[in-house]
Structure formats: C-alpha cells, structure tokens
Image: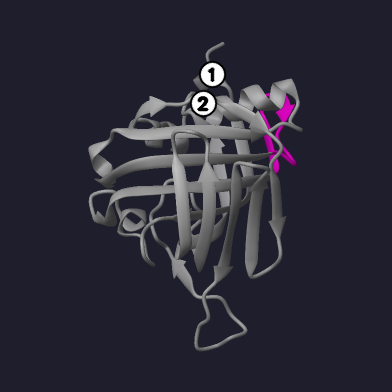
Amino acid sequence: MSAVATSWHASGLMFENCSCQIVCPGHMHFSQACTHERCIGHWAIRVDHGDYGDVSLAGTRALVAFDCPQHMIQGNWTEIVIIDEAASPGQRAALETILTGGAGGSWALLARFVSRRLETRFLPLTFTDEGATKRATIPGVLDASVTNIKGRDRSKPVTFENIFNQIHGATQVLALGSTTYDDGVIRIATDRTHGLHSRFEWTVG
C-alpha cells in the first residue's frame, strides 16, 4: 500500500518563527513578498492526538526548518525535518512521510515548493507550553520561543481568525519569536520577529 493510501489524522500545537517582521506577508499568502531577500524560519510541532494507520502519533514532536525566496510561491525552498529521537521506529517513519508530503494533505501541498530536502534527522527535541510562551530546544542546534503580543484586553491573546493557511488552525495567536538554529545548511538568527501559534488538525482519508 502506498503512503498516500494510508488514512491518518493528527492534532496538536504548533508554533512558527521566521526572519520577517510581524506579520510575515508570506504567511498570509505565498505570493506576497516577505520582509527580506530570504524568508528563513521553522515550524515546531507537538502532536497530542493522532494515528497513521495503526501507528499512534500521540506525544511525538518534530521541527521543520526552511529557507526560501522572498516570494515563497517561486519555490526553490530548502527544508529539513527533525523528529524527536524518543519516537519509535514506526512513529519516525510515519512523521517523516507526513511532513515530507508523502502522505497527502497539507504537507503534500507545501512539498511542491521544496527543491532541496535535507536528510531527516532524529535528535532530542523538547517542546514546552508555558501559556503565553511556547518553546522548543534541541541541544546544540535549536533554541526557539514565541511569546504572545499584548492586545488592548490583556486577558486575551491577539488573534487571526478564519485565515486560510495550509497547516495552521483557523485561529492563530500572534506572537514575537526568537530563534537560534544551525544544522550546517539552514541557519536562523531572529530576535522578536514574526511568530504565532495555533491548534492544528490534519486529516487524510
């Protein structure tokens, strides 16, 4: 059975940070010019519930880092998937298939823009949710966080609602992010740039 014939679903928490100033124009639509000549960033992912066929995805974590042109719709992205080494062999295979586009759905649409895919890595990835702040770390590779921006009503986050985005949930919380990341090819160094987080839900089949 081919990968795209496997029914799967996953839901959880995801945050992103890139080199754009808030708000990243490419997040709104890939045809818009990002802030700088290159848009460089990541998506940090925590799966709370889900299955890929008969493989449970609950509790798994991953990071997708990217480097793409100012007009993201042009393609020619460089991308890497990093999966928490605590994942089982079955979970590793399932997450890699999903996040590289081999299982259909939202990630298959994004994969069309990737011209250089670095080899998937399996490293210790920590993902923490501190309410207004989300963090992800990989020793020696990644230190990333996003923190909610403050709105008029300080008791509520500032959100996007009903924005069409392939991988995020319909409600997205605006944040400022800071990241240091280096895998030897993609390098991210941001400080209080575009960030956001959402509760995602992906389903195929």
Q: Which corner quadrant of the image does residue 63 belong to?
A: top right
179 and 64: which one is in front?
179
Image coordinates of residue 160 in percent, x first then y, are: 44, 68
178 vs 71: above or below: below
**Distance in Å between CA atoms under marks 2 and 1:** 5 Å
Residue 107, visible in the rendered structure = yes
**Residue 54 colored magenta?**
yes
* Vertical position of residue 63 compared to residue 154: above or below: above
Instruction: Read off the residue under disc 2.
Output: 103
Secondary element type, mark 1: helix
Q: What is the count of numbered marks?
A: 2
Q: Residues within 10 Å of mark 1 (few under 14, many from 20)?
A: some
Q: Nearer the viewer, residue 201 or 21?
A: 21
Residue denoted by label 1: 3
Q: Quadrant of the N terminus?
A: top right
Where is residue 103? Give x, y as percent. Answer: 51, 26
Magenta stretch in the rendered image: 48-60
Task: Give amino acid for label 2.
Answer: Ala
**Residue 205 makes an appearance in the image:** no
Q: Position of residue 111 (x, y in %)?
A: 39, 31
Q: Residue at x 52, y 75 (%)?
A: 149
Q: Is residue 138 above or below residue 170?
A: above
**Vertical order, 151 against 29 (above or below):** below
Q: Residue at x 55, y 88 (%)?
A: 153
- The structure's colour scheme is one colour
Expressed as whole percent of the image width and height from the top left, the position of residue 72 reads 28, 44
